[in-house]
Image (spheres, grey):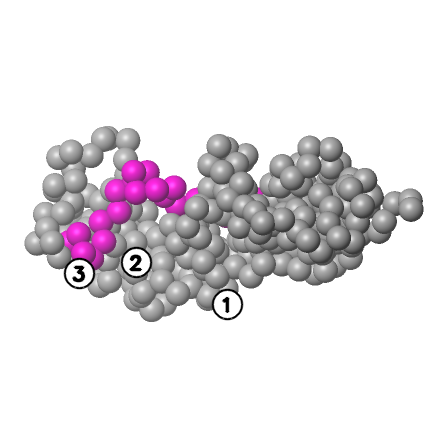
Amino acid sequence: MLTPHVERLIDAALEEDLGRGDPTSELIFEPEARLRGRLLAKEPLVVCGGAVFERVMRRVDPEVQVRLASRDGDEVGAGAILGEVEGRARSILAAERTALNFLQRLAGVATLARAYVRAASVGRAVIADTRKTTPGWRALEKHAVRVGGARNHRADLSAGILIKDNHIATAGSLGEAVRRVRLGAPHTLRIEVEVQTQGELDEAIAARADVVLLDNMGDEAIGLAVERAAGRVLLEVSGGVGLERVPVLSRLGVDVISVGRLTHSARAVDISLEAERLGR
């Protein structure tokens, strides 16, 4: 997870918050003052991002010690101790906000993804994310989605063919758009087509699409689409899917439910760092 891109993201975040120093801690603590801090979950959550938290701390000061008590994917309750940090007070307090921002955000995505996966378990559907990610954070957020038990959709535009309404409008028809793609796409790439009506579904099946995305359809229309497709294509549902609707969609027999809000609307969970000074 700690790729060169993530390392650069950490550096940018630290520059944003610490680039001009931390006069508060520098004026209160002498250089060698030390503290110990406990990472405390203030609510039930799915742990994610401990490695990034540790990397931020050690980026500020390689001598800071981080002892994680939980792993990515662990479910913990309110009051759980997620880990401890120990080192120079100035270093830990300088890194605290940036490190917690990463940890809280990633655990929030993982926690929401886990809730969606549980809601879908009543039927056959799997939960997937989308490309609606925070700019620069895609690799981290998609990691958090996987930690929560959901699946990743395309990592980027090159990862698959997805023919949407604007492609179809420009090509002239759904069938023509699929035809053009088939002429040049590698055989390893699935071809997915977004549709909004039963007629478009029929056209996509006739064009031999591999996956059909049912965009913003109501439950009744989705049920009819499942019957019409009769297993000939993989069916994906997308468009404003709230948690309460997931069990209904999963029972209808769709294969995939893609949910943008896993990444664009996940709430950062409440995690605090409670510190105490060591010695005097």
**Label 3 neighbour load within 10 Å: few <14, some 14-19, many 20+:** few
| Rendered position, 227 above or below 148 | below
Q: In which quarter of the view is residue 238 placed?
A: bottom left
Look at the numbered disc 3 and give the secondary structure of its residue. Answer: helix
Residue type (three-letter) at the residue carrying disc 3: Gly
Tell which of 280 and 214 is nearer to you: 280
Residue 146 visible to an observer of this rendering? no
User: Along the polypeptide, which appears first: circle 1 or circle 2?
Assistant: 2
Q: From the image, state whether disc 3 or disc 1 is nearer to you.
A: 1
Q: Which residues are magenta?
A: 143-168
Residue plotted at (75% across, 36% down): 65
First in sequence: mark 3 vs mark 2: 3
**Is residue 60 at all visible to an observer of this figure?**
yes
Q: Amino acid at mark 1?
A: Glu
Q: Is residue 144 magenta?
A: yes
* Residue 47 location (% of width, % of height): 65, 48
The crowd level at tag 1 (other Cα within 10 Å; few <14, some 14-19, many 20+) is few
Q: In the image, 122: left or right of 30?
A: left
Q: Which residue has dot 1 on it?
A: 244
**What's the distance in space between the residues labelled 3 and 1, CA to CA?**
28 Å
What residue is disc 3 on?
199
Could you tell me residue 50's position as x and y percent? 65, 42
Q: What is the C-alpha distance between the residues marked 1 and 2?
A: 18 Å
Q: Position of residue 251 (x, y in %)?
A: 45, 59
The residue pinned by badge 2 equals 214
Q: Secondary structure at mark 2?
A: strand
The quadrant the N terminus occupies is top right
Amino acid marked by disc 2: Leu
Q: CA distance from mark 3 to mark 2?
A: 12 Å
For discs 3 and 2, the disc positioned in front in the rendered view:
2
Q: Residues within 10 Å of mark 2 (few under 14, many from 20)?
A: many
